[in-house]
Image (cartoon, grey):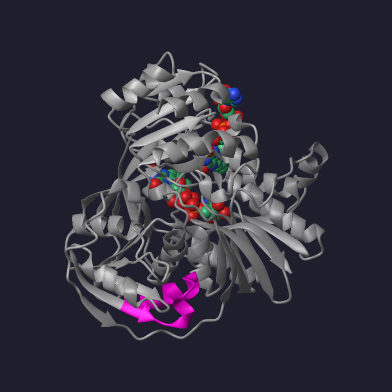
Amino acid sequence: MSLLVIAEHDNASLKAATLNAVAAAAKIGGDIHVLVAGSGCGAVAEQAAKVAGVAKVRVADAAHYGDQTAENLAALIVANAAGYSHILAPATSIGKNTLPRVAALLDVAQISEIISVVDADTFVRPIYAGNAMATVKSADAVKVITVRTTGFDAVAATGGNAAVEPLSAGSDLGQAKLVSRELTKSARPELGAAKIIVSGGRGMGSGENYHKVLEPLADKLGAAMGASRAAVDAGFVPNDYQVGQTGKIVAPQLYIAIGISGAIQHLAGMKDSKVIVAINKDPDAPIFQVADYGLVADLFTTVPELVAAL
Amino acid sequence: MKILVPVKRVIDYNVKVRVKADGTGVDLANVKMSMNPFDEIAVEEAMRLKEGGKATEVVAVSCGVTACQETLRTAMAIGADRSILVESDVELQPLAVAKLLAAVAKKEAPQLIILGKQAIDDDSNQTGQMLAALLGWSQATFASKVVIGEGKATVTREIDGGLETLEITLPAIVTTDLRLNEPRYATLPNIMKAKKKPLEVVKPADLGVDVAPRLSTVSVAEPPKRSAGIRVADVAALVDKLKNEAKVIA
Ligand SMILES: Cc1cc2nc3c(=O)[nH]c(=O)nc-3n(C[C@H](O)[C@H](O)[C@H](O)COP(=O)(O)OP(=O)(O)OC[C@H]3O[C@@H](n4cnc5c(N)ncnc54)[C@H](O)[C@@H]3O)c2cc1C
Ligand SMILES: Cc1cc2nc3c(=O)[nH]c(=O)nc-3n(C[C@H](O)[C@H](O)[C@H](O)COP(=O)(O)OP(=O)(O)OC[C@H]3O[C@@H](n4cnc5c(N)ncnc54)[C@H](O)[C@@H]3O)c2cc1C
């Protein structure tokens, strides 16, 4: 049995989320191949070849794969799908955009955001914003799967020695063209990979307060910064800060929720964190029902005190 | 240009769901059902394109049980001109829904189909992408801005690192993210008007689509419960706990 994992990368380096998808593939068992589709992505292929447990890396290097548009990427994956029992990708925005297209072209179901593997046909996935865990069994010949990265511990990035094999590129379908990308520039760790996350909600009051109050804390802890939907909608921070059912799903060692009430949709994105701290002035805020340590206090005095005490 | 908007009837987002004691699913008896919030955003966007002179007709489609007619009436109260129910009591999975929608799209020949990025019940985030694949159309998922041009659309998407803008050829699929727009409330006169708008009912067999599920649900369980922790009195106590009990900071 062979499995194909779609590499997540930016043409220069392999993204950590790939390691969680390889881990899920390893749980299923079989020969693991990694597909690297990109433009000038040779360095990514070399990194993928070193990932523990990978047997083969297949590289399609062409200009029209550089922007990872779904139409071209899905066509390439489908053209090279023969012989694989499982096709997996991390549930990142690229994976979520592309794999359902692959599944439909193969006429199979997709199993979204699995968090564990029961056997080669059976998987556990959260539904209803994580308020229920469904165990689902696929009757399809090929299983197309997105992997929730927090569900699987990453395999080692080194130690492997896979063969690298070039693939011939498909034609450019010409249906989508990238006009621009505005990526948030930050020296902080990525939300998905951070050990500590400092997250602010509507209680911050303004974007200015969000930065003034929370940045010193994040700096002290080497933390990534997150936010509730209310904080994003109010324009305090950009969209990619949003944690929750419809934002990013995170599970750091420590999640500090500040001025966040704890709506179901927010909890869906962070309740698997190892330790949760909540700072909120409302003693009845639902966030306290999931917090390991709750501090009922005004954030504007408490957070600076915390920074000073660390 | 005609726009098709698929709308799904789901458990209302304010309802706290409960897993059935026998582990077969989630208890949906007597709970409030509403239109999937992302689909309200989709209908709103279609209306804005119509009001802005970019679209001539907005058609809402739902796939599912008879009660989905309520969801379609809501879409028409927001402004959709007419609607189609693909009626089925079978559990419809995303691939089946995408096939039904593809069959409807072939008959209706819209230039644009706007769906929600995910339904808040099953959280699959698949249907739009699958529909695009089945029709061979371009797609722009997780949209926060849509501008229609000549034979193309320029769409800004919410992606992991920030935002990206794509230019896609029409016909196309767009799926909505939360910040695309703020949906209007349906007014009472419009709710009354919606009752008189055309609602056509078809069956999957009429469309020649096999909707048999591909995934079977083995069981549905409660997620592991987090026990509520403790309240700490002040910052000093918090720092002490984090360092010495949880050991998550040095
Ligand atoms: C379809 C859908 C999807 C959604 N997806 C998401 C999602 O992915 N992520 C998400 O976060 N939300 C999501 N939401 C929104 C969610 O329902 C809540 O509206 C949102 O999480 C609330 O954000 P908040 O906690 O910052 O704001 P609020 O609920 O307004 O809470 C603010 C908190 O700050 C506290 N506070 C105020 N001032 C102070 C102070 N000075 N000191 C201390 N505490 C203070 C208040 O006591 C309050 O508890 C979604 C909603 C829908 C309908
Ligand atoms: C009676 C019944 C019982 C079910 N039981 C279960 C169960 O126990 N376990 C389980 O996992 N699933 C069950 N399902 C299926 C599940 O609820 C979803 O309908 C299905 O898996 C589609 O996933 P999704 O809505 O999350 O798709 P997504 O891909 O997240 O939906 C995205 C968008 O697609 C469009 N869309 C999706 N569905 C429809 C529709 N029906 N009509 C119109 N537009 C639509 C909407 O625009 C929506 O915003 C059941 C369904 C029914 C009818």
- Which residues are drawn in magenta? A59-80
- Residue B39: image x %, image y %? 61, 50
Q: Quadrant of residue A25?
A: bottom left
- Residue toward you, A137 or B236: B236
Q: Quadrant of residue A23?
A: bottom left
Residue B86 can be seen in this image = no
The residue lying at 42 percent from left, 67 percent from top is A10
The residue lying at 55 percent from left, 81 percent from top is A174
* Residue B157 drawn above or below residue A71: above
Residue A113 lies in the magenta-colored region? no
* Residue B99 drawn above or below residue B71: below
Give the left or right position of residue A238, taking residue A86 as reference.
Answer: right
The residue lying at 69 percent from left, 59 percent from top is B59
- Residue A46: image x %, image y %? 27, 73
Residue A293 can be seen in this image = yes
Give the left or right position of residue A146, taking residue A306 as reference.
Answer: left
**Residue situated furthest top in the rendering:** B233
- Residue toward you, B20 or A6: A6
- Residue toward you, A114 or A274: A274
Residue A78 lies in the magenta-colored region? yes
Q: Quadrant location of the C terminus of chain B?
A: top left
- Residue A109: image x %, image y %? 38, 60
Give the left or right position of residue B203, taking residue B220 as reference.
Answer: right
Give the left or right position of residue A161, taking residue A80 as reference.
Answer: left
- Residue B72: image x %, image y %? 65, 48
**Residue situated furthest front in the rendering:** A308
* Residue A60 drawn above or below residue B165: below
Q: Quadrant of residue A291?
A: top left
